[in-house]
Amino acid sequence: MYHGFNGHALGMGWGWIIGIFILVAAIIIIVYVVRQNNTVHRQEAKTPLDILKERYARGEIDKTEFEERKKDL
């Protein structure tokens, strides 16, 4: 009935390759999302002192203000 395709209608024997491709794509997407979430959590883990030091390093506050706020913390 289906001559030339070894018994598979229109070459449907290749469907397993599509399944593997979808599985690999899903794994890649999951790994990407997990890594993005870890990066966000690391950035949120800054202490108030870290933020104060960054502001001082950028020149937003002077040494006197830095020392006063450091004492408050």
Image (cartoon, rainbow, N blue to C red):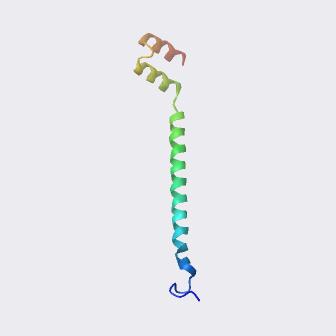
Q: Which corner quadrant holds the N terminus? A: bottom right
- Of residues 29 and 34, the one nearer the viewer is 29
Q: Which corner quadrant holds the C terminus? A: top right
- Of residues 72 and 35, the one nearer the viewer is 35
Q: Tell me what residue is drawn at x 54 percent, y 73 percent.
A: 16
Badge count = 0
Q: Tell me what residue is drawn at x 53 percent, y 68 percent.
A: 18
Q: Residue furthest top?
A: 64
Image height of 63 relative to 8, above or below = above
Q: Using the rendered view, name the quadrant where residue 12 is placed.
A: bottom right
Image height of 59 relative to 44, above or below = above
Q: Position of residue 30 (x, y in %)?
A: 55, 54
Q: Tell me what residue is drawn at x 54 percent, y 63 percent.
A: 22
Image height of 7 relative to 60, above or below = below
Q: Position of residue 11 (x, y in %)?
A: 53, 78
Q: Position of residue 38 (x, y in %)?
A: 52, 43
Image height of 67 relative to 24, above or below = above
Q: Tell me what residue is drawn at x 50 percent, y 86 percent.
A: 4
- Of residues 69 and 24, the one nearer the viewer is 24
